[in-house]
Amino acid sequence: MVDILAGLREVPNVHMVVVHWPIALLPVALGLDLLGLLLGSRDLLVAGRWCLWLGTIGAVLAGVSGLDGANDVHPYVTDEAEELMERHMYLQLGTVGTAVALSLWRVLTWREPFPRRGRLVYVFLSLAMVVTLTVGSDLGGQMVYLHGVAVRVDADSLQGSAEKAHGGEHHHLLDLFLGGEAAPPEHEHEHHDQHR
């Protein structure tokens, strides 16, 4: 029987849960605003404003939980992972700061679906926010998937085993999507050879 929410009970803190809200909502907010401006749709602009506000709340929670979680893993990460963590932190703090500023801007101009004055500056800041969010999120992914930050060392790996029919192969999805060949396994597992 499936253990409901077993994964959530195992997370060291809520950062990896709440971080998905700003990752989803902030780019959607930008997209809705751009479509609203292009099509002259008040409804799209209002939807963009709400996505921004909700995404900003998620970004603040992600920032606070990320800073708290960093204190727990600092003693256990390599120097390379530590460098990634610092870059990730600074970029995402920039994302949070920009999101808060844009949200306050929309609060101050709430009578309008989109700010009239400084419109180009607003769009530029929104684009910058999404860029820092994307790059910072990629660094966070590298920390987890390349360096195993906050991951149990005895957990399953992508290489898998013969028993699970993975054959020790690690396929890079990006290579497969781009039509390239899957990356060869970096190393053979001893237990794989034993079960042949």
Image (cartoon, rainbow, N blue to C red):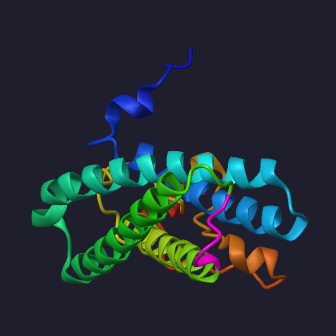
Instruction: Identify the image quadrant of the N terminus.
Output: top right
Q: Over which residues does the magenta segment extend? A: 114-119
Front one among 91 and 142: 91
- Counting from the top left corner in percent of width and height, residue 29 is at 65, 58
Number of numbered callouts drawn: 0
**Residue 190 position (above or below residue 12):** below
Taking 191 as reference, is 51 above or below it? Answer: above
- Residue, x 19% and y 52% (percent of image)? 68
For residue 16, side relative to residue 45 (left or right): left
The image quadrant of residue 92 is bottom left
Is 75 left, or right, of 171 in this rendering? left
117 drawn magenta: yes
Q: Residue 176 vs residue 3: left or right?
A: right
Q: Quadrant of the C terminus?
A: bottom right
Magenta: main secondary structure: loop
State the image coordinates of residue 2 (x, y, percent, origin top left).
Answer: 55, 19
Q: Could you tell me which residue is drawn at 60 percent across and 54 percent down?
A: 24
In this orientation, which residue lies closer to the viewer: 138 or 42? 42
As drawn, is 41 to the left or to the right of 139?
right
Q: Residue at x 81, y 82 (%)?
A: 178
